[in-house]
Amino acid sequence: MVLGFQTESTGQLESVDDMQRFVDAYPEVRKLAGNVSKHVAVIHALSKIVNDRALLDVSSLEQEVACRESRSDHFAQVADMLRNERVSSMDKLRLVLLIALRYEGDPRIQDLTAGLRQAGIDEEEIRLVRAMTQYAGRHARSADLFSNRNFLAVAKNTIQRGLKGTSNVYTQHKSLLWFTVESLIKGRLSTEQFPVSSPLEYGAAASAPHLLQPSREKPQTVVVFMVGGATFEEARDMAELSKQTGCTILLGGSTIHNSRSFLADLSQLVKEQAVQVLPSPLPVSWRASEADLHARP
């Protein structure tokens, strides 16, 4: 749009015919000028928000915590962010939640929750840190969310990041859904975690049990539905993976989540006591079971 405006408005007027063409196109030039001014104003406003809230620093740290194992550095950097007055309360809470998931059980998480209190964040929101680990902690996850469950997974993740490099530090993280669908397309998806159900009719399973085996052929179309809601990052990842593999990927969900809507759902679970927030501190080795959650007050 800007290039088109420059072309229209700075053309050479060397003859009467050029002048006539400019006069004829003048309303269009004025329209382009108005559109460009609006876009520049929006970009300026967004740039001010990014700078005022230190969003580039926050986003870079979120990506580092999600993608790289560096416990001491991450705790120190998040603690600094909690003391930064430019960082919003939501961004501070989100950083602590991410740390709590990656380094679950580390006693220094209590220091970060204390930092949230000092930053003036409501106690109801701080309780979400405990609720998050009960809702999505290691005991509740079947997949290796951070690629850090064993030495081999950590080494593989480090090597892949080193070989591929990072073109943009703000988008280096790939969602778990990316790796799940990629494994499906490559025929490597675990049938234990993702059982196969073939469209069999008239009792064909008994006479043809081989039809229940997963196909190793590359699928042409993959349909993914996220019960509870998908995220914008997952939508971006599916679009990118579709381009890379040539496989059509359709993503659907109960809703499209951002961090605020997801935490609102988690807060509702806490209020309904579907997830009961336990008093702290807890032993590092503690793992909640369903019976624990309902038995404790």
Image (cartoon, rainbow, N blue to C red):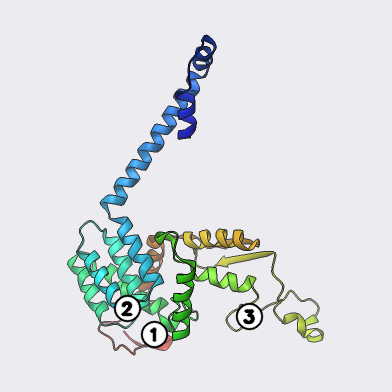
Point out residue 181 in the picture as x, y percentages from the top left corner: 59, 70
Occupied quadrant, residue 221: bottom right
**Which quarter of the rendering shows the C terminus?**
bottom left
Q: Which residue is mark 2?
A: 277
Depth-wise, is mark 2 or mark 3 nearer the camera?
Answer: 3
Q: Which residue is mark 3?
A: 195
Label pair 1/3, CB-CB below 8 angstroms? no
Depth-wise, is mark 2 or mark 1 nearer the camera?
Answer: 2
Amino acid type indicated by mark 3: Pro
Residue 267 appearing in the image: no
Q: Residue at x 20, y 69 (%)?
A: 117
Mark 2, secondary structure of its residue:
loop
**Which label's residue is closer to the chain start, 1 or 3?**
3
Q: Is residue 76 left or right of residue 216?
A: left
Mark 3, secondary structure of its residue:
loop
Cα distance between the residues tagged 2 and 1: 11 Å
Point out residue 216 in the picture as x, y percentages from the top left corner: 70, 76
Front in this rendered view, residue 104 or 283: 104
Give the numbered dot on residue 145: none
Cα distance between the residues tagged 1 and 3: 29 Å
Q: Which residue is mark 1?
A: 294
**Which label's residue is closer to the chain start, 2 or 1?**
2
Front in this rendered view, residue 46 or 130: 46
Q: Residue at x 41, y 88 (%)?
A: 291
Amino acid type indicated by mark 1: His
**Which label's residue is closer to the chain start, 2 or 3?**
3
Question: Label 2 crowding class (10 Å Cα cut-off): few <14, some 14-19, many 20+?
Answer: many
Occupied quadrant, residue 82: bottom left
Amino acid type indicated by mark 2: Val
